[in-house]
Image (cartoon, rainbow, N blue to C red):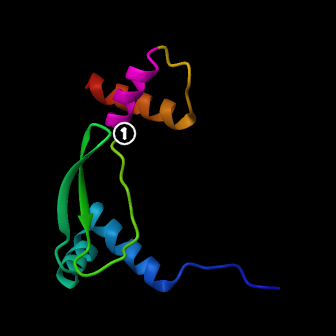
Amino acid sequence: MASPIRPSVGIRIRTLALLSVVMNTPVVAWVTRRLTSEPRVEVSEIGGTSVSILRPAGRGPWPAIMFVNGAQFLKKKREVDPDERFQSEWYRHYRTMFAAAHQH
């Protein structure tokens, strides 16, 4: 029987490096910034929303990681579905989270 497929060590290291920089963990983020080149940054527009596209230095192809701004999604959803007839657990969670943030 074949063993289950496991992510490679390289994927785990790249994921740790990305998350350390995004979450700004002190030591790991510092080491990651020192060991990696500056990314190439491009500003574009997707679906009427301004987005920043960051690519690693060097030649690709590179895997894509996309971070979605929930506030933009909720704004667009309210335009398309003002009566909130179509909902998901994700939508209810973020609607509640953003509503609480706007009260403060």
Name the residue nearer the viewer: 68 or 92: 68
Residue 86 sits in which quadrant? top right
* Extent of the magenta region: 70-82
| Position of 39 relative to 92 (above/below) | below
Q: Is residue 76 magenta?
A: yes
Indicate the position of residue 8 as horizontal and vertical percent values.
Answer: 52, 83
Left or right of residue 89: residue 96: left
Left or right of residue 81: residue 76: left
For this orientation, the residue located farthest to the top is 83
The amino acid type, in three-letter code, at marker 1 is Gly
Q: Could you tell me if residue 24 is visible in this image? A: no
Q: Could you tell me if residue 16 is visible in this image? A: yes
Q: Is residue 46 magenta?
A: no
Taking the spot 65% from the left edge, 79% from the top edge, the residue there is: 5
Picture mark count:
1
Indicate the position of residue 50 as horizontal and vertical percent values.
Answer: 22, 43
